[in-house]
DNA sequence: CCTATACCTAGAACAAGTTCCAACTATCGC
DNA sequence: GCGATAGTTGGAACTTGTTCTAGGTATAGG
């Protein structure tokens, strides 16, 4: 709400911005190969061409790094979705369609999904600001898919929150091999029934 | 489903059963003090009066240990609930009441909750059997609260799954300080609307 | 009693996340 | 150009989860 704890973080120079991108790219690449465990801070630093201390200056922990990676990926997804919005008839169908599309993206890169989702749910309070950003992005994506005209009602917001919970937790169960793809779909569709 | 990977695990002797209990008690105690990070394997071993190697023989990783701790706690909750079942009129209200009761238990021991929930969502495939046990226990608790007469319908099972997702994920957001107690209540109640 | 077997112990060793340090470098105000 | 400041580097050091080893102990079958 207030801007007190983070005073607008000094804008990065071009070189710094480039370093940051390089680090995020390396992170996504390593995560894509072997998931959470394969993202090793020394290797990220080395492959990104920065010193370990520098990596930690940019991302104060492995979890921070992976949550930032997720934010990065989500922004891409959001862009894609803006270009090709869901086509379903009612809001519930559009939200389900959108989430299933995101889910298919994760199926293409299950290791990357593993790294990001595990980091997200493992994050403690020290990462809450960053996790919150990811959460807001997800909410925005869902609200976009609903395509509502005015401000969402409190009931709609509650429904969206439950859908988001279901989304995260269903992903966790799928990633740990305890739920099938079909099961995830059903769960998402069930949660989406709360919209209408 | 099959019994192939775990051939009924040789029954423990009395001394072994006692060791196991001691370890779980220590785990819960340390977790209660400082959450996930405060449960350090060396300290668990020492306080339980067993060697580190023995601790690892009983619980092959810290996550295994904490998931087993959660299972232990859940069984206690289930017993309590059997003695004093929820009193709401309809199934949805009873489930919400039950989960809010569980939530209040967690509020009394937020650090313990932190350790158990973080372990549960961080668990990878190597722990899926144990996590599955916890999940089944949770499902049983919810179905009990619904107090249904016959076999649950597929729709009811889907609803229960979404409620369970919401429960886990809402806990995670509460533990990381991103949602208030009131918010968790609303989310649980919203998800429970899927029952009726 | 005796030994084979499985279990337990103390502790070293290893792996990866994180912190710290001393020296070097880029950059900005003057 | 010059000093002050902040950022970067390479690398050692520390922490905690996990593995390994060599030897000790309980116990069941003979």
Image: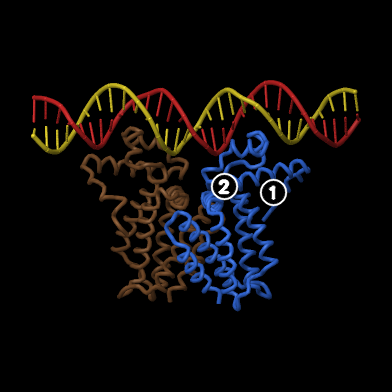
Chain colours: A brown, B blue, C yellow, D red
Q: Is residue B31 left or right of residue C3?
A: left
Name the image quarter holding the N terminus of chain B.
bottom right
Q: Nearer the viewer, residue A187 or B75?
A: B75
Give the vertical position of B78 relative to A35 (above or below). below
Residue B68: x percent and y percent? Answer: 63, 49
Residue A102: x percent and y percent? Answer: 40, 59
* Same chain? Circles 2 and 1: yes
Give the vertical position of A90 relative to C21 (above or below). below
Image point (61%, 45%), residue name: B27
Q: Earlier in the sequence, mark 2 or mark 1?
A: 1
Give the vertical position of A43 relative to B17 (above or below). above
> Tag count in the figure?
2
- Secondary element under disc 1, as helix, strand or loop, is loop
Q: Which residue is mark 1?
A: B4
Q: Which residue is mark 2?
A: B31
Give the chain of mark 1: B
- Secondary element under disc 2, as helix, strand or loop, is helix
Give the chain of mark 2: B
Q: Is residue A100 left or right of residue B50?
A: left
Image point (25%, 43%), residue name: A17
Which quarter of the figure has residue B136?
A: bottom right
Residue A181: x percent and y percent? Answer: 51, 59
Image point (40%, 42%), residue name: A61
Q: Nearer the viewer, residue D19 or D27?
A: D27
Label annotation for residue B46: none
Mark 2 or mark 1: which is in front? 2
Image point (47%, 58%), residue name: B174
Q: Is residue A188 left or right of residue A12?
A: right
Give the vertical position of B10 relative to D20 (above or below). below
- Whole-Å distance between the Cαs marked 2 and 1? 33 Å
């Amino acid at each position: 709400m207030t801007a007190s704890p983070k005073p607008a973080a000094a804008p990065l120079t071009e070189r710094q911005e480039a370093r940051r991108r390089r680090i995020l790219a390396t992170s996504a690449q390593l995560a894509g190969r072997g998931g959470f465990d394969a993202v090793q801070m020394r290797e990220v630093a080395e492959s990104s061409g920065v010193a370990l201390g520098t990596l930690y200056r940019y991302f104060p922990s492995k979890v921070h790094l992976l949550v930032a990676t997720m934010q990065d990926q989500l922004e891409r997804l959001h862009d894609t979705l803006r270009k090709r919005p869901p086509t379903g008839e009612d809001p519930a169908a559009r939200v389900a369609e959108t989430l299933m599309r995101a889910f298919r993206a994760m199926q293409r890169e299950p290791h990357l999904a593993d790294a990001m989702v595990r980091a997200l749910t493992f994050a403690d309070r020290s990462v809450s600001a960053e996790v919150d950003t990811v959460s807001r992005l997800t909410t925005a994506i869902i609200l976009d898919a609903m395509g509502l005209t005015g401000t969402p009602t409190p009931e709609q917001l509650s429904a969206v929150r439950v859908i988001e919970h279901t989304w995260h937790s269903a992903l966790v169960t799928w990633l740990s091999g305890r739920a099938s793809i079909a099961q995830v779909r059903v769960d998402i569709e069930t949660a989406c029934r709360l919209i209408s």
